[in-house]
Amino acid sequence: MKIILKDDVKKLGYRNDVVDVKDGYGRNYLIPQGLASLATPSALKVLEEEIKQNRAKEEQRLADAKALAEKMEGTVLNIGTKAGSNGRIFGSVTTIQIAQALKDMGYDIDRKKIDIASDIKELGTFKAEIDLHKEVKVNVDLEVFHEE
């Protein structure tokens, strides 16, 4: 079934994308959650007109995202956590902690836009990818250290 996404959906697409999904996923999850609508011919025409009207705003968002990406490039986030003597941390570092560290540095990034390749369960240096725009992604380094 073809649907129009009303919001960004991780690993599926971005707002206003027309995607093809299985019927059950579309009817039982995406549409009831308000994340998508059916891609009927009339809905596609409305979408096309909306995209036309929002083109200038979208270009501005893209320029802002690129500027923010340049500013964030090479950023190292220091995240303090409690750890055992063997270097293993109690629990794991989550996107919530990363978002808070970014906020402390002056970047207001939603935690859902942050992607960590694997669970961070020990002290060391790691990478995280931040999705600023559908065309702009930036990698930041995470330095996880033992906090007393």
Image (cartoon, rainbow, N blue to C red):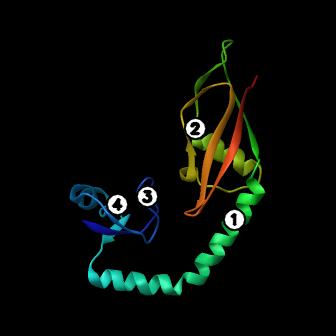
Label 3, on which residue?
9
Q: Quadrant of the C terminus?
A: top right
Label 4 element class? loop
Q: Residue at x 58, y 38 (%)?
A: 94
Estimate the x, y position of residue 33 in percent, counting from the top left: 34, 60
Q: How many circles with numbers are drawn on the protein?
A: 4
Distance from Cα at disc 4 to Cα at disc 1:
31 Å
Q: Quadrant of residue 144?
A: top right
**Which callout, 3 or 1, points at the residue further toward the start of the chain?**
3
**Which callout, 3 or 2, points at the residue further toward the start of the chain?**
3
Label 1, on which residue?
66
Dot 2 amino acid type: Thr
Dot 1 amino acid type: Lys
- Closer to the camera: disc 2 or disc 1? 1
Label 2, on which residue?
94
| Above or below 88: residue 62 | below
- Closer to the camera: disc 3 or disc 1? 1
